Image (spheres, rainbow, N blue to C red):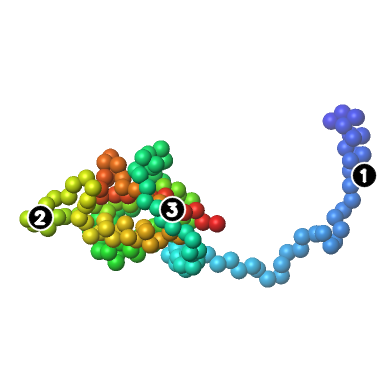
């Protein structure tokens, strides 16, 4: 340091004063207890909070073209599940997706099987019980779902849905 620097430093040192006692940070005598929640406990709390959703919310069925420019942030595959199992998985999946801030997700249900001897499904209709259950679930849960649409063929076609997830406030 040069003499000018020394003079400047001494001037700064002389202009400061110690912190008054009332402004000092004093350590607590007792440690603060922090609760760490497991993932399932967190999801249960979110699900409980979401159960009292506002009645003006609704879910809309949209055209697939509205989802093309958005990228998928998560996916869930419900193949081989019963409706009860799928409902539980959907609740946990959407609670987690909502907490993580995911906006667009893919729900894969499969097309379902036509009973033997019946007409196979066409482009507008699929016979799967799980697929139809999932559509009803998406409509019944506007606190998690903003809108949904049938997926394009590259993402599953009749056996999958694009879903816009509602953001949490």
Between 126 and 10, which is closer to the camera in this rendering? 126
Helix or strand or loop: what does disc 1 sit on? helix
Identify the residue at horizontal 89%, vertical 51% (top origin).
17
Q: Nearer the viewer, mark 1 or mark 3?
A: 3
Helix or strand or loop: what does disc 2 sit on? loop
Q: Residues within 10 Å of mark 2 (few under 14, many from 20)?
A: few
Judge whether 72 appears above or below 76 on screen: above
- Could you tell which of marks 1 and 3 lies nearer the N-terminus? 1
Q: Determine the CA span between mark 1 and mark 2.
A: 94 Å
User: As drawn, is 140 to the left or to the right of 21?
Assistant: left
Name the mark on residue 118: 2
Identify the residue at horizontal 37%, vertical 51% (top origin).
61
Identify the residue at horizontal 7%, vertical 55% (top origin).
117
- Could you tell which of marks 1 and 2 lies nearer the N-terminus? 1
User: As drawn, is 120 to the left or to the right of 48?
Assistant: left
User: As drawn, is 23 to the left or to the right of 111?
Assistant: right
Q: Position of residue 62 (x, y in %)?
A: 37, 47
Q: Residues within 10 Å of mark 3 (few under 14, many from 20)?
A: many
Q: Quadrant of residue 68?
A: top left
Q: Determine the CA span between mark 1 and mark 3.
A: 63 Å
Identify the residue at horizontal 55%, vertical 67% (top origin).
35
Q: Residues within 10 Å of mark 1 (few under 14, many from 20)?
A: few
Say which quadrant the C terminus sits in.
bottom right
Name the mark on residue 45: none
Name the mark on residue 146: 3
Q: Position of residue 109 (x, y in %)?
A: 27, 54
Name the mark on residue 14: 1
Q: Determine the CA span between mark 2 and mark 3.
A: 35 Å
Residue 162 in view of the camera: no
User: As drawn, is 135 to the left or to the right of 49?
Assistant: left
Q: Nearer the viewer, mark 1 or mark 2?
A: 2
């Amino acid at each position: 340091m040069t003499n000018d620097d020394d003079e400047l430093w001494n001037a700064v040192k002389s202009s400061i004063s110690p912190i008054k006692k009332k402004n000092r940070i004093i350590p607590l005598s007792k440690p603060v207890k922090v609760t760490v929640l497991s993932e399932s406990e967190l999801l249960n709390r979110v699900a409980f909070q979401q159960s009292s959703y506002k009645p003006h919310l609704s879910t809309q069925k949209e055209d697939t073209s509205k989802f093309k420019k958005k990228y998928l942030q998560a996916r869930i595959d419900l193949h081989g599940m019963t409706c009860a199992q799928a409902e539980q998985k959907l609740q946990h999946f959407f609670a987690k997706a909502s907490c993580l801030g995911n906006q667009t997700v893919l729900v894969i249900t499969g097309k379902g099987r036509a009973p033997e001897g019946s007409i196979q499904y066409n482009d507008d209709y699929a016979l799967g019980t799980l697929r139809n259950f999932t559509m009803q679930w998406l409509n019944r849960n506007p606190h998690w779902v903003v809108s949904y649409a049938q997926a394009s063929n590259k993402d599953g076609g009749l056996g999958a849905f694009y879903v816009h997830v509602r953001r949490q406030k």
